[in-house]
Image (cartoon, rainbow, N blue to C red):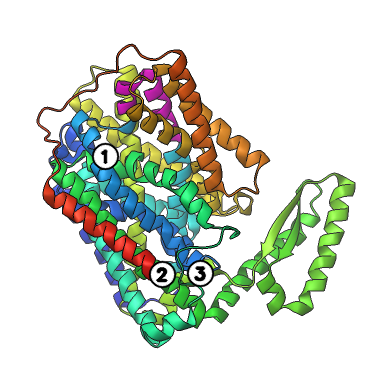
Amino acid sequence: MTVDLGVTDVVVFFAFFAVVIGVSMFKSRREKTSEDYFLAGRGLTWWLIGLSIVAANISTEQFVGMAGQGAGNVGLAVSNWQLVGTIGIVVIAFTLLPRFLKAGIYTMPEFLEYRYNSATRAIMAAITVIIYVTVLLTAVLYSGGLTLSAIFDIPLAKGVWLIGVLALVYTAWGGLKAVAWADLFQGSALLVGGIVTFFLGLKVCGGWHAFSETNADKLHMILPASHGELPWTGVVAGMWIVIIYYCGLNQFIVQRNLAAKTLRDGQLGVIFAGALWLLVPFAIVMPGIMAVSQYKPDLAVEADKQNSALIARAEALEADADAAMIVLIPDKEWIARRPDDEAAIRAANARRRLAAEQANREIKEETLVGHKYDAAFPVLIRKLIPMGLRGFMFAAIAGAVISSLASMLNSASTIFTMDVYNRLFHRSASQGQLVWLGRGMTVVFVGIGCCMAPMLDNPDFGGVFQYIQRFQGYIWPGVVAVFLFGFIMKRAPASSGVAALVAGPVLYGLFQTFTPHINFLIQVLITFLIVCLIMGVMTLIAPLKEPRKLPVRKDMDVKTQPIVSIAGAVVIAAVVVFYIVFW
């Protein structure tokens, strides 16, 4: 969906990124050692950490996927991901963060070597780099390319490379400090842009009272256990495991915390990020709800464009004897909008099923949708944002993509350089060699991601968000288990760490294959519990004689200051109030 832009919009868009790249490269011009490059010289202050975490976290997955789910049948409840994350990141500020800062580590895999053994470190490093480069980085590049394609009507591949090069320039140049300073602008812009959209949408809806009355059925945080997408049982059961991983063990988020100047800066930084996440329901989710309440016909038009392409593809593949047969399943909204066409679709499906059975061809089911809810936020921008301000809005959205991409690039290059190259191949590498390798791997990872990203445009992948979810679930349970169990059970043997990282993906994969009817968050919980049971049995059979000693960074004071406790309590209280209001 191409959006009209004026000359002022285009100038604002490119001027924004000129400022972002210029300032970030200037601020990081003296990065010489590996600690400078990968951890910003361990000198990040709390406000920079907080905004950088928000910018790294929020991407098109939120502006498209989260706003779309808000517009669809999940409503405000999709905000559970951010609000449970707020609680989780505050708890992590008082529990995991002091341990990591005290140890003085560069990466999460490095910590596992101190707690378990080098094999555990190597396995997690390998898994993390592979997932970051082939899944997360590729998906972010793809979604960013789609964003630019929608704005400027340029080919997807060119949009992907433009996004990749923009992130590459300052990330390869200045490492984490460059990323953090770029995030200062991009994180602020995306929150300001979202809030502006919220208030403009509220005006169109007739004010808060009219909006809340019209959309009362969507403004609930708790959904029934029977809900197909986000039941309350899934939130209670498995979401906390995802949050612990994402906020406390995920390198591209935690790396900012490891670079904190002091424990106070690290703790206040993540608490500040949690506080800013409280804006997400207003800046992203509620605008999605506004779009469906005010501009639902436009979402139908976008759905028809998607459906027409799908119908054409099904007809083309029907004539291809070597291809899978596609049958089209109309949803309730499509049937309600186009009842006269339902019979033709059903007849075509019956014909294709019969032909597939006779020719022993695979059958794939695709859905014809009545409304394209993922278009909610772009539709709102097209309808509400005046010319002159659209350039800033799209710069904010594109900046969110680039921030996430830059964070993943920096973290992937850090893990490859420190956990793979420096640890396994060249322990005596000089600081200069490590920095240049980090820069080189950043270039390599961008190249791989840009080559892979256009492949996600193939409908067989089922969409970018399904692509992300399909693979992320394989690492959550095992990684969380290996850290938490290792903290609690001091005598867990080294072999249990390896077992957890191997068993987690295997068990989750079995659940995905044989119990697809169970919500994936519940599958995550069951996998986590089984992995913990395996580690518990191994600890009973062969416990360590003495707990392993972790490294200690002598210049790091790990005593929590009163102001940090007060800030954490205030943020948690705000989350509780939000749940009470929107129960």
Q: Is residue 320 above or below residue 250?
A: below
Which amino acid is tagged 1?
Answer: Thr
Q: Name the residue under label 1.
A: 95
CA neighbours of label 1 inside 10 A, class few (<14), some (14 to 19), many (20+) = few
Depth order, front residue of 33/111: 111
Secondary structure under the numbered disc 3 in the rendered image: helix
Visible residue check, residue 217: yes
Residue located 20% across and 35% down the image: 101
Mark 3 or mark 2, whichever is nearer to me: 2
Quarter of the rendering containing residue 429 = top left
Visible residue check, residue 182: no
Q: Does the magenta stretch include residue 283?
A: no
Mark 1 or mark 3, whichever is nearer to me: 1
Residue 74 at x, y = what percent? 52, 65
Which amino acid is tagged 3?
Answer: Ala
Residue located 36% across and 52% down the image: 85
Q: Does the magenta stretch include residue 116?
A: yes
Q: In which quarter of the image is the C terminus?
A: bottom left
Q: Residue lying farthest bottom?
A: 206
Residue 246 at x, y = what percent? 38, 45
Q: Give the range drawn in magenta.
A: 110-130
Do the CB atoms of the residues marked 2 and 1 lie less than 8 Å apart? no
Which amino acid is tagged 2?
Answer: Phe
Depth order, front residue of 282/487: 487
Secondary structure under the numbered disc 2 in the rendered image: loop
Residue located 42% across and 58% down the image: 80
The tag on residue 375 is 3
